[in-house]
């Protein structure tokens, strides 16, 4: 039996299908849904399926690098933010890697450029055995400025 996943309130994660090597995320148990900062969101059709193209700036408070991503749209959700504003957002499903966790996660796309974190990882993305320690950070490796290094 493996030990439960322990997370700090912020962690480094990878989005391999979107070609994002490292992204600092806030682990937000108060949020049901995960959210990713996306700019210039464009919906289009591919093989009679809804897809989305967007630009992602994975580094906090920086406009470079910029990654152009494409993914199929799983659905559209109405999400209410902490200010009580409701927004209809496209949802994509993509793989995340966070420490020993490798999982497909539903993520809403929205403009988070004015927010401190480019991604929120909501509670539905976490295994039920995960523990979030709110006074700790980067329990899965790395530090405030540097992602973990694996040999």
Image (tube, grey):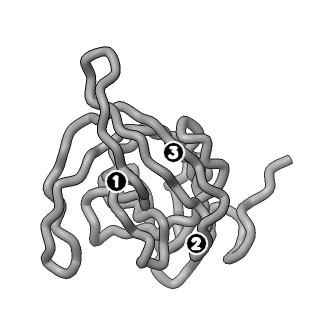
Which residue is drawn at the image coordinates 44% and 71% (left, top)? 113
Q: Which mark is residue 95?
A: none
Q: Given this view, does label 3 or label 1 mark the residue nearer the observer? A: 1
Marks 3/1 in contact by CB < 8 Å: the verdict is: no
Q: Which residue is mark 3?
A: 96
Which residue is drawn at the image coordinates 51% and 45% (left, top)? 96
Kindly give the residue lying farthest to the bottom in the view shown: 135
**Secondary structure of residue under mark 3:** strand
| Distance CA(mark 2)–CA(mark 3) | 18 Å
Q: Which residue is mark 2?
A: 60
Which residue is drawn at the image coordinates 25% and 60% (left, top)? 32
**Residue 86 at x, y percent in the picture:** 13, 66
As displayed, is residue 56 above or below residue 116? above
Q: Is the residue marked by circle 2 packed among few (<14), some (14-19), or many (20+) residues within 10 Å?
A: some
| Disc nearer the start of the sequence (2/1) | 2
Give the camera-side residue of 15 and 130.
Answer: 15
Q: Which residue is mark 1?
A: 109
């Amino acid at each position: 039996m493996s030990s439960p996943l322990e997370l700090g309130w912020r962690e480094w994660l990878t989005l391999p299908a979107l070609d994002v090597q490292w992204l600092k995320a806030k682990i937000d148990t108060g949020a049901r849904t995960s959210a990713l900062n996306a700019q210039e969101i464009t919906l289009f059709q591919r093989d009679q399926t809804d897809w989305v193209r967007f630009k992602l700036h994975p580094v906090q408070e920086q406009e470079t690098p910029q990654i152009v991503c494409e993914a199929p749209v799983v659905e559209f959700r109405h999400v209410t933010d902490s200010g009580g504003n409701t927004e209809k957002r496209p949802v994509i499903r993509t793989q995340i890697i966070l420490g020993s966790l490798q999982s497909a996660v539903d993520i809403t796309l929205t403009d988070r450029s004015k927010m401190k974190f480019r991604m929120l990882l909501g509670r539905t993305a976490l295994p039920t055995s995960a523990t979030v320690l709110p006074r700790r950070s980067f329990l899965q490796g790395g530090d405030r400025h540097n992602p973990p290094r694996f040999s």
